Image (tube, helix red, strand yellow):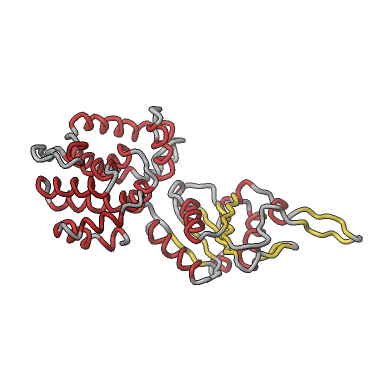
Amino acid sequence: MTPTELKNYLNNLVSKKLQISTMIWGPPGIGKSSIVAQIARQQKIRFIDVRLSQLAPTDLRGLPVAENGISKWYPPEFLPTEGKGILFLDELNMAPPAMQGMAQQLILDRKVGNYTVPPNWFVWAAGNRKEDRAAVFDMPTPLANRFLHLKVEPDFDSFKEYAIASQLHEQIVAFLSYRPTLLHKLDPQQPAWPSPRSWEMASQLHSAALEVQPAIGEETTAEFQAYLAVYKSLPQLEKILAGEGEKIPFPSEPSVRYATTVGLAVRARDANQGCNGFSWLSKVATPEWVQLFVVDICRQMRAINKIGALATMAQKDKKLSKSIAEVRELIGL
């Protein structure tokens, strides 16, 4: 499933109070822990992220303490004792077998040692796949049969929605719109390679005018740097957003078209500018570019809390209203 589909599925588990043992599988860097953290924020519940590969069994079970001649296990302070939330055990299959045994008892039985998970807490886990060349251990078949298994794959549309909402750098979003296959390109031979996680780091570096190669690797950086040259050929986007683009033509080069369309969407600061961008594109571009803009402008307006104003203005523009209706399911309106 895509990250968006995973998010919807997990939201339903929480909303319908289905405390089923759940394992999330996916390649490194895809944002599994970030998705679970987003669920917790949306549901307004706590989120505790435990990296199992960095712990020893006693870190989870607790320390034995003598009390009245009997050894009792005192649980660690990071385990929840009240309230509602998600206890997320990340990197489950990267932990050594002894550690996995403790974690699996916590997930399946909701207890370990003298500790019991509070009633309103969900216990989920995540891990990487063998094909990702991660240092993972096999999960026994009988144990695996007691989990829900959710497999998530990289998906540019899901990432783009997140990128616009999180205000990642415009040039990062435009480049990946043009080269979506570079969203996630695992290279086990290199320490740095492109993934949703590393592109978010690259956005921070690029915004600070720093080199992005440490985040996404040499090969991808070379393509990104070459792409940046297209910004010298961009039309005057601010004039278009101000409604003064009557004499401005749509670029002919595909890479510049992506930069133009994405740039208009993410630079729009209100519904009026969004409508001006749509009006210009609908006159100078073919329908696929108009649709791309409509999807992105809706995401941008939602990110800056202007989606209601855009919907109101769309009622006065039949073309815009029709375009929004056509992509309504895709953008979740």
Q: Quadrant of residue 330?
A: bottom left
Relative side of 105 to 294, left or right: right
Q: Is residue 145 above or below residue 291?
A: below
The C terminus lies in quadrant: bottom left
> Which quadrant holds the N terminus?
bottom left
Q: Nearer the viewer, residue 130 or 223?
A: 223
Q: Residue at x 34, y 47 (%)?
A: 164
Q: Nearer the viewer, residue 315 or 3?
A: 315
| Residue at image location 72% in from the left, 56% down from the top | 61
Q: Is residue 231 left or right of residue 190?
A: left
In the rendered view, would you say 211 is above or below 1?
above
Q: x, y percentage for residue 173?
A: 31, 42
Q: How many numbered discs, if any? A: 0
Say if 222 sits above or below 128 in the image: above
Q: Could you say which is closer to the camera, residue 308 or residue 286? A: 308
Q: Seen in the image, is 6 located left or right of residue 93?
A: left
Residue drawn at the location 41% of the way across and 32% of the way down: 205
User: What percent of the width, then of the height, locates residue 198?
Assistant: 42, 40
Asked which quadrant contains residue 260, the reply is top left
- Residue at 24% x, 60% y is 327
Residue extending furthest toward the left: 247
The percent position of residue 290, horizontal first and vertical second, equals: 17, 51
Name, please, the residue furthest toward the right. Answer: 69
Q: Is residue 286 left or right of residue 102?
A: left
Image x and y of residue 78, in percent: 67, 52
